[in-house]
């Protein structure tokens, strides 16, 4: 590489070996990150991508006047610098728009999945199941409120309850998830569950080979709001 420096923090270089150039710039990034990198001669697409991603402010095959004052040089290249900065800002905005678009697509996908799940039979209820009330659900149920004593909840699918249960649960799904509920009467696929084993903030209950398995999902306090 043939190099020359200017008083306005311009680093001029020509590229004979791309790998050596990249290694040199990586090793001296702190030194040159506030410089204008002036590339003389040919510049490949690989180098252009590298300079943009690092990022460096760079110019290509621009003739700088040698021997002038710092102020004169800054005035001479003020417009060029503005253009370079404008290009970087535009590229950053484009990247942000792409990132936002991707995020929105992911969010839309998750919403669509949830909607499909709801359409297939998941019921979401956020009201309290009061004493004497019997709730029967064909499919999965997400209950965001408590089940009072002398109330009964029956589901043919999976059951998730985020608040305390003091009534009866009858679930025939693949699993249940409930909080610590020492007063609950729980029958899961015809098998009674020992609710004294529900020690955690959220417990997953499964039936395997006619045996009940209870595993902690969340041990610490959680906020469902």
Image (cartoon, grey):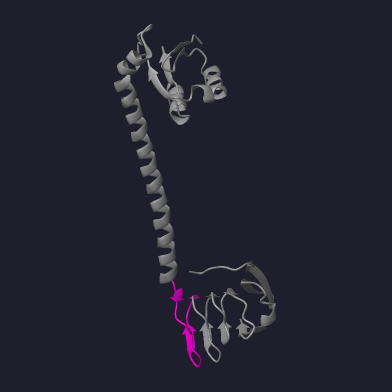
* Residue 43, visible in the rendered structure: no
Q: Main secondary structure of the magenta part?
A: loop
Q: Is residue 161 magenta?
A: no
| Number of marks in the rendered image | 0
Rendering coords of residue 107 (x, y %): 41, 56
Q: Position of residue 177 (x, y in %)?
A: 58, 73
Residue 121 magenta: yes
Residue at point 44%, 18% (across, down): 9
Image position of 102 (left or right of 21): left
- The x and y percentages for residue 218 are 62, 67
Q: Is residue 30 visible?
A: yes
Question: In front here: 138 or 135?
Answer: 135
Q: Is residue 182 left or right of residue 40?
A: right
Q: Toward the viewer: 27 or 190?
A: 27
Q: Quick one: 140 or 75, which is closer to the camera?
A: 75
* Residue 28 in which image quadrant: top right
2 shown above or below 213: above
- Percent across and percent down for residue 21 are 52, 18
Q: Is residue 14 above or below residue 188?
A: above
* Range of residues picked out in magenta: 120-142
């Amino acid at each position: 590489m043939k190099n020359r420096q200017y008083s306005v923090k311009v680093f001029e270089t020509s590229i004979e070996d791309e790998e050596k150039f990249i290694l040199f710039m990586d090793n001296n990034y702190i030194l040159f990150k506030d410089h204008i990198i002036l590339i003389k001669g040919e510049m490949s697409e690989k180098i252009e991508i590298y300079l943009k991603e690092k990022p460096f402010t760079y110019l290509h095959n621009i003739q700088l006047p040698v021997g002038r004052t710092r102020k004169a040089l800054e005035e001479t290249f003020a417009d060029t610098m503005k253009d370079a900065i404008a290009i970087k800002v535009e590229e950053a905005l484009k990247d942000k728009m792409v990132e936002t678009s991707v995020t929105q697509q992911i969010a839309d996908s998750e919403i669509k999945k949830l909607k499909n799940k709801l359409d297939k039979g998941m019921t979401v209820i956020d009201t309290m199941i009061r004493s004497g009330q019997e709730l029967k659900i064909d499919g999965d149920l997400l209950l965001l409120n408590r089940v009072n004593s002398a109330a009964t909840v029956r589901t043919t699918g999976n059951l998730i309850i985020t608040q305390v249960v003091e009534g009866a649960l009858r679930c025939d799904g693949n699993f249940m998830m409930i909080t610590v509920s020492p007063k609950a009467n729980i029958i899961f696929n015809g098998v009674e569950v020992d609710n004294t084993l529900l020690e955690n903030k959220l417990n997953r209950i499964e039936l395997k080979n006619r045996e009940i398995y209870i595993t902690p999902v969340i041990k610490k306090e959680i906020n469902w709001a």
